[in-house]
Image: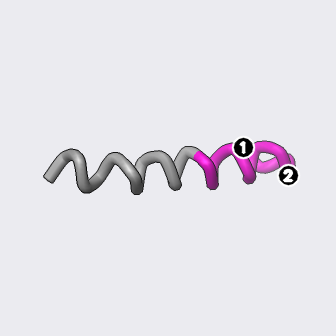
Amino acid sequence: MVTDLLPLLDKSEELVNCFKKRGFS
C-alpha cells in the first residue's frame, strides 16, 4: 500500500517544484 503511494509523492514533489519555479508559494 505504502509503496504504491511513493510514486505519487514523487509526482507531487515535482509539481510543487514546478510551481515554486513559477513564483507560486
Q: Amino acid at mark 2?
A: Arg
Residue 18 or residue 7, whichever sits in front: 7
Residue at x-position 52% and y-position 54% = 11
Q: Position of residue 1 (x, y in %)?
A: 14, 53
Determine whether, in the image, residue 5 is placed left or right of residue 14. left
Q: Count neighbours of disc 2 (C-alpha within 10 A) and say few if under 14, some if 14 to 19, many if 20 or more.
A: few
Residue identifier under label 2: 22
Colouring rule applied to residues: one colour
Residues shaded magenta: 14-25
Magenta span: chief secondary structure: helix
CA–CA distance in space, label 2 to label 1: 9 Å
Q: Count neighbours of disc 1 (C-alpha within 10 A) and say few if under 14, some if 14 to 19, many if 20 or more.
A: few
Mark linked to residue 9:
none
Name the quadrant containing residue 13. top right
Residue at x-position 63% and y-position 54% = 15
Q: Position of residue 8 (x, y in %)?
A: 40, 56
Residue at x-position 42% and y-position 48% = 9
Determine whether, in the image, residue 20 is placed left or right of residue 10. right
Residue identifier under label 1: 25
